[in-house]
Image: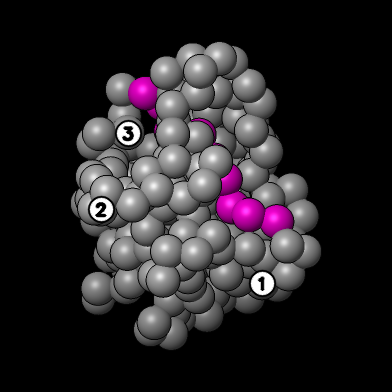
């Protein structure tokens, strides 16, 4: 999946689908680009110098010839409020991005459907930051159970648009930090556009189209 205090989900959280996304077209000799982004390489790797907009999301989809799909985040999360400012690194088989949480923001960790901490091949958990004033729009309580040291369990709300990027991404996230992935999805969540690693997307989203 959230300027510096806005959020991803997956980022977050944040986070392959249950249907097969269409393969991107082979890149032309000169990469497609705008002032903010470009698509390069045979697999169509997305790179951006600035934060992406909803308009950019649609233009990128047209450039690579892939239709976005509607997806709903179904994986659970454990979350707790930050008591003080801290830097949170989001990892999935390497560093994906980082964000600075302020006191009152939420530190969110992805869980499996069985409410176990979701971990990558290196054993790292997928943790990210949601701004304090955005958390209630994105998540709701899922019972009274808590996960040790990680907080109460919540379920996500709402539907996003997801664009498959087989070549991965190296973009500037809405929270002002670089976000990278070797393969994954570009997520449009309201007005926020951010990346999501392919494996976390597979484990936490359901494709509706």
Residue interval drawn in magenta: 124-132
Image height of 17 relative to 162, above or below? below
Q: Position of residue 15 (x, y in %)?
A: 51, 57
Q: Residue at x 39, y 38 (%)?
A: 192
Q: Position of residue 86 (x, y in %)?
A: 63, 21
Q: Where does label 2 land, which residue? A: 142
Q: Quadrant of the C terminus?
A: bottom left
Side of 195 where 20 appears, left or right? left
Q: Secondary structure at mark 1?
A: loop
For residue 43, the mark is 1
The answer to whether residue 165 of the structure is visible from this angle is: no
Mark positioned earlier in the residue sequence (1 or 3)? 1
Say whether residue 131 is magenta. Answer: yes
Q: Position of residue 146 (x, y in %)?
A: 40, 48
Q: Nearer the viewer, residue 67 or 88?
A: 88
Q: Residue at x 25, y 34 (%)?
A: 136
């Amino acid at each position: 999946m959230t300027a510096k205090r806005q959020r991803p989900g997956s980022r977050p959280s944040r986070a392959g689908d249950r249907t097969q996304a269409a393969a991107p077209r082979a890149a032309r000799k000169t990469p497609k680009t705008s002032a903010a982004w470009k698509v390069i390489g045979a697999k169509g790797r997305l790179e951006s110098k600035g934060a992406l907009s909803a308009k950019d999301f649609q233009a990128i989809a047209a450039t690579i010839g892939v239709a976005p799909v509607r997806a709903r985040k179904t994986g659970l999360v454990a979350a707790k409020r930050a008591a003080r400012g801290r830097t949170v690194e989001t990892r999935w088989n390497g560093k994906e991005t980082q964000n600075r949480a302020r006191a009152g923001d939420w530190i969110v960790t992805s869980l499996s459907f069985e409410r176990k901490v979701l971990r990558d091949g290196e054993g790292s958990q997928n943790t990210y930051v949601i701004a304090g004033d955005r958390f209630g729009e994105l998540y709701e309580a899922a019972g009274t159970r808590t996960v040790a040291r990680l907080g109460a369990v919540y379920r996500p709300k709402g539907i996003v648009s997801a664009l498959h990027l087989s070549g991965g991404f190296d973009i500037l996230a809405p929270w002002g930090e670089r976000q990278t992935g070797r393969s994954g999805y570009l997520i449009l969540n309201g007005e926020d556009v951010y990346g999501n690693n392919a494996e976390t997307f597979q484990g936490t989203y359901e494709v509706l189209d």
